[in-house]
Image: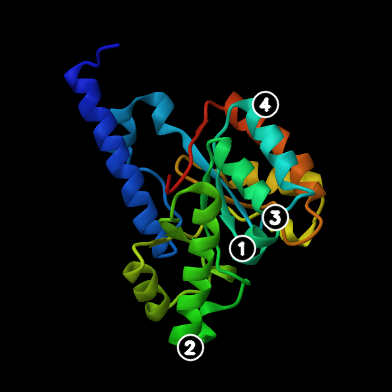
Amino acid sequence: MSVRPGRRTAVGRFRTAVGALVVALAAGAAVTLPAAEAQAAGPRAAKVVYLTFDDGPSPAYTPKVLATLARYGVRATFFEIGQNVAAHPSVTKQVARAGHSVQNHTWSHPDLRRLSASALNAQLADTDRAVRAQTGRTPSCLRPPYGSVNSTVRSKAAALGKQVVLWSVDPADWSRPGTAAITSRVLDNVRPGSVILLHDGGGDRGQTVAALPSIISTLKARGYGFAALCG
């Protein structure tokens, strides 16, 4: 199918805006797509959000998350812990085969600001190797545990060719506040361009799994689309 020159330009500007989104997230900002870029990309592209899942892969919960994403035709980004990838390699492979983005969330979930240079490097490089072995791709983004980041962490990430990606909507699902609370905290705070922080690993994620269908279906009903970061 041919694409009109004006439409191709609009799509290009939208992709540039998404790149700017990742950079803004590296600074820890709550961000949305610039209005001009969103309008140029069209009303559907203007309302895009990014579902992200931390601390997996989990053999108990990641497949359930994947099943829901598949049911609604949604792509997401999974920030995975290296030691979990090593323990459950087939689950990481399943995430990648489903078309989702698999990114670096360190090897063992430490506060990277407190590590020596060599230990920090090992946390990122070891996770890269584990993910690459299952997906065939080296992660291009890093999500620091706890959102803890400083100039050293940014420099090391940049040296490894990575963007630092945080989030703009956090329902604190890790604390298991209840399915209804997780759902309402996301839906009440989401905006075009929001990066939503959820968890598929690190504990009992049954509430997150239960909240996901309502989150996705409601956002779709509001006219939102979904995309993966760093993919």
Secondary element at image label 4: helix
The earlier-in-sequence mark between 4 and 1 is 4
Question: Tag 1: Cα neighbours inside 10 Å, few (<14), some, or many (≥20)?
Answer: many
What residue sits right under mark 3 in the picture? 88
Left or right: where does residue 93 sit relative to residue 50?
Answer: right
User: In the picture, residue 9 is in which quadrant?
Assistant: top left
Disc 4 marks which amino acid? Arg
Query: At 73% across and 60% down in the image, what residue appears?
Result: 174
Mark in the foreground, 1 or 3: 3
Which of the image's four quarters has the N terminus? top left
**Amino acid type of the residue that numbered disc 3 sits on in the rendered structure:** His
Amino acid type, mark 1: Ile
| Lower position in the chain sequence, tag 3 or tag 4 | 4
Report x, y in % for residue 191: 50, 42
Marks 1/3: CA–CA distance:
11 Å
| Residue 69 position (above or below residue 54) | above
The secondary element bearing badge 1 is classed as loop
* Residue 46 position within the rendered picture, expressed as x and y whole percent measured from the top left: 40, 32
Between label 2 and label 3, give the one nearer the viewer.
3
